Amino acid sequence: MLDYPVGVAIKEIINENSNVKTFVLDAQLDAKPGQFIMVWIPRIDEKPFSLSKISGDIAITVQKKGKATEKMHEMRAGEVLGIRGPYGNGFDAGKARSACIVAGGIGAAPLVPLAEALQNPEFILGARTKNDLLFEERLKKCSELYITTDDGSAGEKGFNTQVLERLLGEGEKFDAVFCCGPEPMMRRVFEICESHKIPLQASLERFMKCGGLGICGQCSVNGIRVCADGPVFGNEMLKKMLEFGNSARLKTGRKVPLKEYAEWRQK
Amino acid sequence: MLDYPVGVAIKEIINENSNVKTFVLDAQLDAKPGQFIMVWIPRIDEKPFSLSKISGDIAITVQKKGKATEKMHEMRAGEVLGIRGPYGNGFDAGKARSACIVAGGIGAAPLVPLAEALQNPEFILGARTKNDLLFEERLKKCSELYITTDDGSAGEKGFNTQVLERLLGEGEKFDAVFCCGPEPMMRRVFEICESHKIPLQASLERFMKCGGLGICGQCSVNGIRVCADGPVFGNEMLKKMLEFGNSARLKTGRKVPLKEYAEWRQK
Amino acid sequence: MLEVDLCNLRLKNPTILASGILGVSRELLQRVSDSGAGAATIKSITLNPREGHHNPTIIGFEAGIMNAVGYSNAGIEEAKKEFADLSGIKIPIIASIVAEKPEEFALLAGEIDSLHQFSAIELPLSCPHTPGFGLLAGQGTPEATSAITNAVREKTRLPIFVKLSPNVPGIGELAKSAEKAGASAITAVNTLGPGMLIDINSRKPVLDFKCGGISGPALRPVAVRCVYDVYESVKIPIIGVGGILTGRDAIEMILAGATAIGIGSGIYYRGMNIFAQVCREMEMWMKKNKVKSLEEIRGQAHA
Amino acid sequence: MLEVDLCNLRLKNPTILASGILGVSRELLQRVSDSGAGAATIKSITLNPREGHHNPTIIGFEAGIMNAVGYSNAGIEEAKKEFADLSGIKIPIIASIVAEKPEEFALLAGEIDSLHQFSAIELPLSCPHTPGFGLLAGQGTPEATSAITNAVREKTRLPIFVKLSPNVPGIGELAKSAEKAGASAITAVNTLGPGMLIDINSRKPVLDFKCGGISGPALRPVAVRCVYDVYESVKIPIIGVGGILTGRDAIEMILAGATAIGIGSGIYYRGMNIFAQVCREMEMWMKKNKVKSLEEIRGQAHA
Ligand SMILES: Cc1cc2nc3c(=O)[nH]c(=O)nc-3n(C[C@@H](O)[C@H](O)[C@H](O)COP(=O)(O)OP(=O)(O)OC[C@H]3O[C@@H](n4cnc5c(N)ncnc54)[C@H](O)[C@@H]3O)c2cc1C
Ligand SMILES: Cc1cc2nc3c(=O)[nH]c(=O)nc-3n(C[C@@H](O)[C@H](O)[C@H](O)COP(=O)(O)OP(=O)(O)OC[C@H]3O[C@@H](n4cnc5c(N)ncnc54)[C@H](O)[C@@H]3O)c2cc1C
Ligand SMILES: Cc1cc2nc3c(=O)[nH]c(=O)nc-3n(C[C@H](O)[C@H](O)[C@H](O)COP(=O)(O)O)c2cc1C
Ligand SMILES: Cc1cc2nc3c(=O)[nH]c(=O)nc-3n(C[C@H](O)[C@H](O)[C@H](O)COP(=O)(O)O)c2cc1C
Ligand code: FES
Ligand code: FES
């Protein structure tokens, strides 16, 4: 097993919006939707990113947030990022025939390749504003796309979860729901799925150190490792994960309320 | 690669004669005729031995000579020997349709499985006395067997090489000759094959340390490693090996005449 | 048949989760216990919270794992909350504490002791990659080992495990000074090296701390030799740690003289089930070889 | 594009056969030269013939090779015959000598020098498994390193390569004392550990000397770190040795600061062609990365 970052060149950088860039890398991997890679920004940091493109050259889509992602947003094609992986279980798209995908913000990244792998799923894409919407073009081609924005600047005004609720209320029968996005959103999707008894696969996010090796425990949610046991979890696991939607661990390992964690992650 | 001795039990010990025992080991290997294993006698020594049986449980046939082989001859079924391997190129039995095998003394060991793999080869088995003859029963079943003894106590009196010469003189056409035995004998077989332009495969013996790893140089014959480049060599290689039949290296690495080497090996 | 007595702790089997691997939360310890470990060690804690080194902190290479985590931990106050109640966990839990000075070690030991949740205290005096601690603070000398062990001994009656480095000239001597100062057992060993990995495309060392300690298969033969050396030097039991992946590796450590064995990197290679797997493999070997207890074969490689 | 200048020796490429691997005869050196090595080192020779340790002396394990050969060699008199004429070999050949005392080192160096066949003399002060020599004779201290290097320096004008151990607390300091005493280059490193392997069925250590030095992949990250440390400590060139199997590994060593690189165990993993293979892999990388000479990237990981 070679689990150290190997430098690969950035082949192309796509500006998705003012805050989000997609980095196409000079690398091919045998990966499935929902898996992630650990990305090393030499001398700066190493972070997990979901694969937003898995066929041909792989790509990751990165939202500018902190030290590492700011540095990445300054990089140009030709510069080198180190990658290792892919890691994680990924989504199990296996039997889904009528699927609904719920994406919040940057959480759309791992869900686009999933949408492309499924048979015309319903895709509910949520973002704060029109400007924050991601992958609209790609998603239109492979899914029945619903759009929500918090401010109503595009699509429906409000949360993506309310579309899911409405569809279900209208009698749509989904045999699988997939979601990724801010944890409060995912918690809400989980509750909706639970009440409708629909199998959910939610992709969680936690700060990682060994990222995929499964030995440091940093990413654990009630003793379950997001990097090695997840990052995608089904209803049964989510039920056991009492910290899901509630708390997460800082770099010191201290467990704090999700809000405090999110604030720390913004830095 | 796991190239350290792993202890295996001795399953059965067959007394071939007063000086030679066959040890059937509780181990199976994917090996071909002419390959050898390194055998570790715990706390005593580690030595190369040819596989005298390769299908089912493997076996080695050992002549009592020095510290290690004496210790082995004292061992009983159930006791543990360490083995690693198989090593070496082995014989290339591939295209041989009318083969002649020339065996001298304990050199018969790697040649029996070879005889069993070929289509009824001629097999010239030489030994000092009747008592020293090995594998007669097994060989009768799979080959046209000729026997020579130095003292005439069985078969023809004289060297095995004289049978080879006679057969060739009588017009027999061999498309391959295989041999193993004391080096002066093999040198003679080589000369005979050269003059008759017959492809020879001779299995050489040298003192070994890394035995099969090919890194210590101890077993080298004119820069050619018996353990990793051999132990089986064809005419072209043998021609380059000026030390073949002439000299060999002691444990210190000193090159000495073959006679001095043989005397040291007896100890 | 795998039960062992380690400083009067009854372990149902000799496998112990090594410190720094997974042991950051009560629930992970529970899970390790459920996976069949005989005991578990928490990740080392310090007086104050520490973020540790920047990422990358942990990588896998051809022959093992390299890490420079740098003792990230939430500090003793958080630890007291996290581990306030371990009673539900049916295996002994070992606390691991590190500090810069003997007095600080003593203070932490006192806190741990008064929690009444832990069965022993481990003192890693041997980290090769964290400034202020272990080898980088000179804690790997006989003098420092002695001073720290003494200071902790005064604060607790719990068994003390002193964890040594393989990167010292005479590990036997070091073990002796720990034994003399009141150590109850020796944990051998911490990580090797340190080592460094450079990415040739970015031309930079990969670990943010540049170098890190080596664990896993690359370490195993060195760890076995260390356990063998320590066994010839002291009477107290040894916990053999380093590159144990299989029942074979565990038996090897016991033959070298270990009473119990630690597993860390093995979780990377075989998953959390490694504890049960190693135990099953040991049992199979024991049955085949008619060995009734590990006591029977302990240190036998010295014969 | 791979040429390097090592202490005024012009190497066509930076790969050097490490001491103790194959270098026991003129013809093996010839073969290594034919295989594409840039230079080759003979197996270390002593004053008197030595049989070395009993077999098993060399084994492969999961993560590398372990050996306790114990300096078997035919002694200086035989060596003078074996290497009396190296003129047919087109690459520089480096002599390696070991002895118990500085005067003996000096004597051997004089003999080597007067043969006029060798391009440099290597002094391994770092073997971890041969009583009377290297670490087991205290030759790995700054004082002994200095005394031995000095004594040899007085007997020869050939470049002197001092070969260090990775098993010492401060390799940088050691390199400094060698440099001060007149070393022309540092060879970093000799084998790691020592380690021990125990066969669980016979319940005995496998190597007859029980423990042995570790080389190959398990050693590589430690060797890279050592080269990195030495590069920050001295001005003389470094020959990086330890676990190099590929062009990647060779470039990694050069980025750490090595001028040339040694290959030993790699022959086990990739055969004798490894020299040509490593060179081709280095060239491919250099072309892709528009690097014109190794000089350009030497030590760049320190930037
Ligand atoms: C598996 C996985 C992979 C990831 N991969 C990447 C990656 O590749 N690149 C990267 O940069 N980051 C990645 N992240 C991090 C990322 O998901 C962010 O932490 C998260 O999406 C917040 O992003 P945002 O700021 O854009 O969302 P926000 O803008 O805060 O919210 C986006 C949408 O979520 C919904 N929402 C928000 N709050 C609630 C609520 N309380 N209830 C219901 N709905 C709500 C709304 O519809 C809103 O429009 C990944 C996360 C996960 C889980
Ligand atoms: C590939 C290989 C594998 C080996 N495997 C084993 C092994 O598994 N076990 C083991 O114990 N040893 C093994 N050996 C060692 C072994 O072959 C002996 O070194 C060698 O056979 C001498 O054995 P001996 O004492 O029985 O022969 P001897 O009794 O000395 O000679 C046997 C016969 O060789 C012929 N002969 C002898 N001298 C000459 C001469 N000058 N010219 C022509 N013919 C001559 C005669 O026909 C004589 O009858 C192996 C050797 C090789 C090459
Ligand atoms: C990621 C990681 C973190 C570690 N952290 C600690 C630690 O905090 N305290 C400690 O004593 N040892 C620590 N170690 C060392 C291990 O406890 C163990 O001694 C070493 O890894 C060798 O065992 P292994 O080969 O089974 O992993 C750590 C090891 C790893 C790999
Ligand atoms: C079998 C063997 C024998 C060795 N003998 C010597 C020796 O005689 N003198 C010496 O300086 N180093 C000796 N070494 C050490 C090597 O020269 C080298 O420093 C070490 O193996 C690390 O490099 P590698 O990983 O490429 O093998 C020996 C190594 C091996 C494996
Ligand atoms: S990040 Fe280390 S276990 Fe998940
Ligand atoms: S015995 Fe070592 S090279 Fe053949």
Image: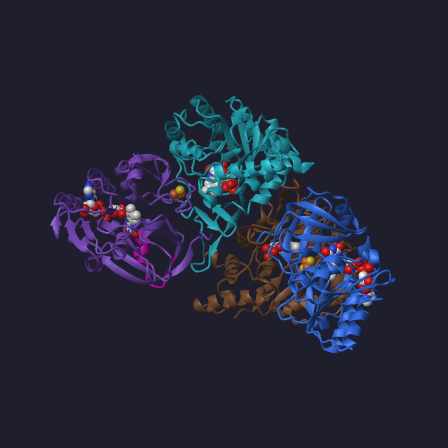
Chain colours: A blue, B purple, C brown, D cyan
Q: Is residue D63 above or below residue A33?
A: above
Q: From the viewer's perspective, is C168 left or right of B118?
A: right
Q: Image quadrant of residue A198?
A: bottom right
Q: From the viewer's perspective, is D257 left or right of C53?
A: left
| Position of residue B259 measured from the top left corner of the image (x, y, whole percent) | 25, 38
| Position of residue C226 measured from the top left corner of the image (x, y, whole percent) | 56, 51
Q: Is residue A202 above or below residue D248?
A: below
Boundaries of the magenta span: B69-81
| Position of residue D261 measured from the top left corner of the image (x, y, whole percent) | 54, 35
Q: Nearer the viewer, residue A39 or D113?
A: A39
Q: Does the rendering let one see residue C129?
A: yes
Q: Nearer the viewer, residue D276 or D143?
A: D276
User: Please, which residue is most extreme toward the right here?
Assistant: A151
Residue B72 drawn in magenta: yes
Q: Does the rendering let one see residue C55?
A: no
- Which residue is at a point 57% across and 68% down the rendered structure image? C276
On the rendered image, what quadrant is the N terminus of chain A found in? bottom right
Q: Quadrant of ligand 5?
A: bottom right
| Position of residue D133 measured from the top left corner of the image (x, y, whole percent) | 49, 37
Q: How many marks?
A: 0
Q: From the viewer's perspective, is C7 left or right of D66?
A: right
- Which residue is at a point 81% across and 57% down the rendered structure image? A132
Q: Nearer the viewer, residue D212 or C138?
A: D212
Q: From the viewer's perspective, is D19 left or right of C123?
A: left
Residue A106 drawn in magenta: no
